[in-house]
Amino acid sequence: MTSYADSHDAREPRRRADVTTDAPRLTTPTIGVLGVLLDAQADDPPWGFRICRDTDLGSGTVYPILERLTERGWVRSWYETEPHPGRPARRFYELTGTGRQLATNALEARQQKRTRFGLRPEGGVA
């Protein structure tokens, strides 16, 4: 039996061609990443470090979340093409149309469930 590692270049991430409606586990970090992506403007897409900064999460947390969302077809990414002297090219991220709808639905369902069980809103009470 041939394993995935035997049949593919280990440097190439596994990709899914189809979008799945299965919501990722909505942990606090995943909610933060989805929030940044949902709030992003089309003319100003977030890049990896900006998502880390805006969510106050480390790259070891943010990039695996982005990879899982990409594998599900919720997110697409691309590298900047303009000159970027003195730093690596940024990799921009945005929700796909379907990903935006699924993320919105998943977050709304989570909020309804939290409200039904009398849990506080995200972030606690000010």
Image: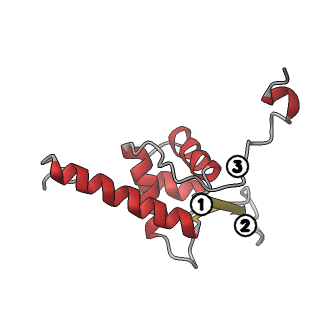
Going by the numbered disc 1, the residue's amino acid type is Trp
Q: Find disc 1 in the rendering and name its residue.
A: 47
Disc 2 and disc 1 in contact, CB within 8 angstroms: yes
Quadrant location of the C terminus?
bottom left
Secondary element at tag 3: loop
Residue 16: give its label: 3
Q: Residues within 10 Å of mark 3 (few under 14, many from 20)?
A: few
At x 15%, y 46%, the residue is 117
Q: Find disc 2 in the rendering and name its residue.
A: 80
Closer to us: 75 or 32: 75
Closer to us: 124 or 119: 119
Q: Label 2 to label 1, Cα distance in Å? A: 9 Å
Q: Residues within 10 Å of mark 2 (few under 14, many from 20)?
A: few
At x 74%, y 65%, the residue is 84
* Residue 123 appearing in the image: no
Disc 2 and disc 3 in contact, CB within 8 angstroms: no
